[in-house]
Structures are given as C-alpha cells and as structure tokens.
Amino acid sequence: MNKLVLALGAVLVSAGFAAADPLEGQWRTAKDDNGNSGLIDVAPCGNALCGTLIRSYNSAGQQIQSEHTGRRIISATTPSGGGKYRGKVFSPDRGKTYNSKLQLNGNTLKVSGCVFGICRDGGTWQRVN
C-alpha cells in the first residue's frame, strides 16, 4: 500500500512539471506591409497558447514605439500534430485577426491565415530564444 501511495504521489508531482510546448518562447515576425516587424512572446494562456507583442522594429531594424505593444497577437492557438498549430493571429498593419495556420520547423515558424475568405501569408518568423 505504501508503494502505491508513493507511486501515485510521484505521478502527481511530475504532472505539475509538464514540458513546455515547442512554440513557447520569443519570435521575431516577418516584416509587414510597412516594413515593420515585432518580437512576440508566446506562452500558455488557459488551454491554449498566446503571443504578446513586446517590441516593434522599423524596416532598418531599430526599435520603435507601437500602439500595439502589449497586445495579444497570437490567441486561441493549439497544436494539431506534426508541428502544426491552429488559432488566431492579429495583423497590426491591417488591423485584422486571421484564422491562422502555423507550421513550426525547428527555429522557424511559417504563419498564414484567412479572414472572410481573404488569405494572407504572414511570412516566416525566427525564434529569438
């Protein structure tokens, strides 16, 4: 009986230390229509993953102020297997939220999405850390 209790306790403790999702971390977006890019911090939010804009950069790569800093760019995103994710991505340059597909491949993330039948290639994002 003591062994069973210890084994159950070990399982419960290890469950609290679940591995991070491979999408978690910081990502540098591709340049938008204005040549700007951003740094997105992806972390769990409830049962999904979300990404918040923490820095913005101009076309020369210099940090700039943005009204969207602190805004959730990625939301309601969940893995669908094989490095694929589905969720929502907000595009600051167009002011629209797209139903998105994300494809993780090592340190790159291919982003695309559609809204009202209009689809957009969000480019390839690079992992920063």
Image: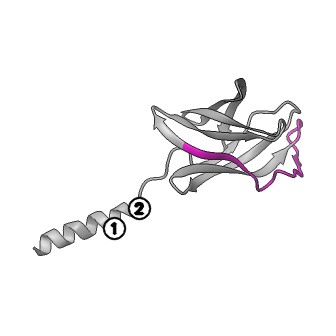
**Residue 26 belongs to magenta span:** no
In this picture, which residue range is highlighted in magenta?
A: 58-77
Residue assigned mark 1: 13
Q: Is residue 88 depicted above or below 116 in this figure?
A: below
**Residue 72 belongs to magenta span:** yes
Q: How many marks?
A: 2
Res 101 label: none
**In this rendering, would 22 be left or right of 35?**
left
Task: Tell me residue 48's x, y (percent).
Answer: 54, 50
Q: Tell me which residue sits at (83%, 35%) in the image.
A: 94
Q: Tell me which residue sits at (20%, 71%) in the image.
A: 6
Tell me the CA gap for discs 1 and 2: 7 Å
In the rendered image, the residue lying farthest to the front is: 116
In this view, the residue in front, 79 or 27, is 79
| Quadrant in which the N terminus appears | bottom left
Q: Would you say the residues marked 1 and 2 are in contact, meaning their CB atoms lie under 8 Å apart?
A: yes
Classify mark 1: helix, strand or loop. Answer: helix
Q: Tell me which residue sits at (80%, 33%) in the image.
A: 31
Task: Tell me residue 17's x, y (percent).
Answer: 41, 61
Crowd class of label 1 (few under 14; some 14 to 19; many from 20; radius 10 Å): few
**In this rendering, would 9 be left or right of 38?**
left
Task: Write down the quadrant of residue 126 in the picture.
Answer: top right
Crowd class of label 2 (few under 14; some 14 to 19; many from 20; radius 10 Å): few
**In this rendering, would 5 be left or right of 46?**
left
Classify mark 2: helix, strand or loop. Answer: loop
Residue assigned mark 2: 17
* Residue type highlighted by circle 2: Phe
In this view, the residue in front, 65 or 75, is 75
* Residue type highlighted by circle 1: Val
